[in-house]
Amino acid sequence: MIQDQINALESRQLELQAVMASSDAHAAKCTKLNKKFSTQYPEEHAAYLEANEEYNRNEEALAELYAQRDAEKEIEEVAENIEPMED
């Protein structure tokens, strides 16, 4: 079901946001000290980049799923509003 796919991706997005947010303090520290985050924390930077790439791919997938879900709802609403033909 489309809603199940949406729910799973939205949940994953929250996990990815947490991964990306966990780097914020170190990134801010590096900016203050005029140092490169990628050099000072290479593993953390790699994890951030990986999470960010997946997050962006998921956003595209979610947009498609939302559109598909909305189209199906619209079809259901139209079908509900069609009056049966009388003989």
Image (cartoon, rainbow, N blue to C red):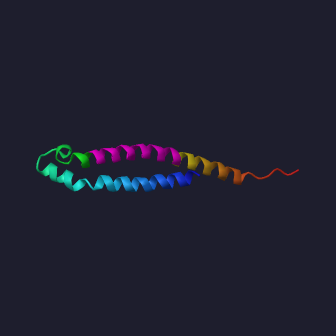
Q: From the viewer's side, name the closer residue of 81 and 43.
A: 43
Nearer to me, 46 or 82: 46
User: In this orientation, which residue lies closer to the viewer: 30 or 86?
Assistant: 30
Which secondary structure dominates the residues rendered in magenta?
Answer: helix
Q: Nearer the viewer, residue 35 or 69?
A: 35
Q: Give the percent coordinates (x, y) of residue 61.
A: 47, 44
Number of on-image labels: 0
Q: Which residues are magenta?
A: 46-65
Percent of width and height locating residue 83: 76, 53
- Residue 79 x/y as whole percent: 70, 50
> Is residue 56 covered in magenta?
yes
Residue lying at the far left of the rendered structure: 33
| Residue 84 pos. (x, y %) | 79, 52
Residue reaching furthest to the right = 87
Point 38% across, 47% down: residue: 55
In the picture, measured across the screen, residue 38 lies left or right of residue 17, that is left
> Does residue 13 appear left or right of residue 86 in this picture?
left
Q: Is residue 52 left or right of residue 78?
A: left
Tell me which residue sits at (61%, 51%) in the image. Answer: 73
Q: Is residue 16 magenta?
A: no
Question: What residue occupies the far front of the structure in this picture?
Answer: 43
Relative to 50, say whether 81 is above or below. Answer: below
Q: Residue at x 50, y 56 (%)?
A: 7
Quarter of image, res 38: top left
